[in-house]
Image: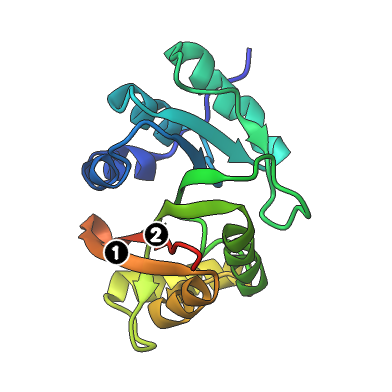
């Protein structure tokens, strides 16, 4: 029996995130979660939004922990998690209708963030929505002292990680054919960006 991994941050932010994604994902679709981590978000959002199919994904080493949460939750709309690294040359599904990712852009290297948006360009359907949660800098500046300290801590662990600049991320989104619908302020100096893939003319 595998012990369930636990993230206090997931518990702290799940309710405010739910309020935003309930509005963004308001039709029956499959939501692909990129970097599901512990699996707590997947279980909570699937239980609160039963009209959605939730597809958790993460690197292979994290799947047993996600499955431990899934096995306990016993939700019919929560699929078995799939192994996915954003740099994989092929993703598990073409024609994704909805994507959610939380606290991933600042963990990945910038090259991986670029690859993520390249994959969005390839794998997201026209009009698909992508919700991205986490901290961002604006005009190259931290939004709080706590974010500045968090960024220093991130880079001490991995020099390639760090809080990303909103404008740089939006440039990647634009190149991938995604437009910003809403930049939502969230607790603890985080944001939740709601993007939508533009239709092909």
How far across and how far down the image is residue 127, in percent? 42, 54
- Mark seen at residue 181: 1
Sequence-wise, the earlier of marks 2 and 1 is: 1
Judged from this view, the residue extending furthest toward the right is 89
Indicate which disc residue 166 carries: none
- Dot 1 surroundings within 10 Å: few (below 14), some, or many (20 or more)? some
Say which of 109 and 151 sits in front: 109
Q: In the picture shown, does residue 124 fall above or below 78?
A: below
Q: Is residue 164 left or right of residue 157?
A: left
Q: Is residue 13 above or below residue 159?
A: above
Left or right: 99 as drawn, with respect to 9:
right
Residue that lies at the very extreme toward the front in this rendered image: 201
Image point (54%, 76%), residue name: 175
Label 2: few (<14), some or many (≥20) within 10 Å? many
Tell me which residue sits at (39%, 77%) in the image. 166
Q: Which residue is mark 2?
A: 196
Q: Position of residue 119 (x, y in %)?
A: 63, 59
């Amino acid at each position: 029996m595998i012990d369930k991994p636990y993230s206090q941050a997931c518990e702290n932010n799940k309710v405010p995130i739910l309020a935003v994604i309930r509005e963004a994902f308001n039709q029956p679709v499959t939501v692909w979660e990129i970097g599901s981590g512990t699996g707590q978000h997947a279980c909570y959002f699937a239980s609160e939004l039963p009209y959605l199919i939730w597809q958790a994904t993460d690197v292979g080493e994290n799947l047993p922990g996600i499955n431990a949460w899934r096995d306990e939750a016993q939700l019919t709309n929560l699929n078995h998690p799939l192994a996915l690294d954003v740099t994989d040359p092929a993703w598990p599904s073409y024609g994704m209708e909805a994507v959610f990712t939380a606290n991933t852009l600042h963990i990945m290297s910038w090259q991986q963030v670029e690859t993520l948006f390249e994959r969005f360009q390839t794998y997201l359907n026209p009009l698909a929505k992508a919700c991205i949660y986490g901290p961002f800098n604006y005009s190259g500046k931290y939004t709080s002292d706590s974010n500045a300290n968090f960024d220093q801590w991130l880079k001490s662990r991995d020099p390639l990680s760090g809080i990303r600049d909103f404008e740089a991320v939006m440039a990647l989104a634009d190149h991938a054919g995604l437009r910003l619908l809403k930049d939502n302020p969230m607790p603890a100096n985080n944001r939740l960006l709601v993007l939508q893939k533009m239709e092909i003319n």
